[in-house]
Image (tube, helix red, strand yellow):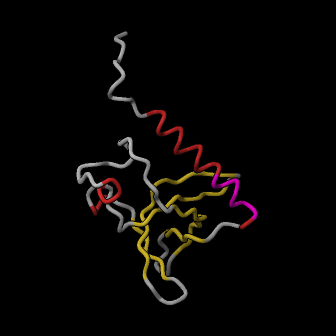
């Protein structure tokens, strides 16, 4: 995916280090919006050694660090809407993780297997 098309968010940790995260998906849970983010510096091909690999489509089991953040819509000083990413309540974290697992496993199920012949209607 082209760098300009990616939704990149910049965070700073307690020591002032910059962390760039890419928004992978947005979802709603109990009426609140959340986002799933991953490290924007990780290249897909770095995980399995195949430079042409899109990790979502290969058979390799890749470890990705994912972050779940609550999305708040705020107005900046110019009156434009902005997204603010904040840590979700600890009490919701387990439920949010399960929602994300379910969403990603459903997406994997929707990807057709190239080895399976498609039946014509």
| Residue 52 place in picture, x, y as percent | 23, 49
Decide: is 13 above or below 63: below
Q: Which residues are magenta?
A: 91-97
| Residue at the image position 28 percent from the left and 63 percent from the top | 4
Classified by dominant secondary structure, the portion drawn in magenta counts as helix
Q: Residue furthest left?
A: 51
Magenta segment includes 14: no
| Residue 1 place in picture, x, y as percent | 28, 54
| Residue 104 place in picture, x, y as percent | 52, 45
Q: Residue furthest bottom?
A: 15
Number of disc labels = 0
| Residue 53 place in picture, x, y as percent | 28, 48
Decide: is 115 above or below 46: above
| Residue at the image position 43 percent from the left and 53 percent from the top | 62
| Residue at the image position 68 percent from the left and 61 percent from the top | 93
Q: Quadrant of residue 46?
A: bottom left
Q: Residue furthest right?
A: 91
Q: Residue furthest top?
A: 121
Decide: is 64 above or below 74: above
As drawn, is 53 to the left or to the right of 14? left
| Residue at the image position 55 percent from the left and 87 percent from the top | 14
Is residue 96 or residue 114 the one in the foreground?
A: 114
On-image quarter of the C terminus: top left
Decide: is 85 above or below 28: below
Is residue 110 or residue 75 the one in the foreground?
A: 110
Is residue 58 or residue 18 the one in the foreground?
A: 58
């Amino acid at each position: 995916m082209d760098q300009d098309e990616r939704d990149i968010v910049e965070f700073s940790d307690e020591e002032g280090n910059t962390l760039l995260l890419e928004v992978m998906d947005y979802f709603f849970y109990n009426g609140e919006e959340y986002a799933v983010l991953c490290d924007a510096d990780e290249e897909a091909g770095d995980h399995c050694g195949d430079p042409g690999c899109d990790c979502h489509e290969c058979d390799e089991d890749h470890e990705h660090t994912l972050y779940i953040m609550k999305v708040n819509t705020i107005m900046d000083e110019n009156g434009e809407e902005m997204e603010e990413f904040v840590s979700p309540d600890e009490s919701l974290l387990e439920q949010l993780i399960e929602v994300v697992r379910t969403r990603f496993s459903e997406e994997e199920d929707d990807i057709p297997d190239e080895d399976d012949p498609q039946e014509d209607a």
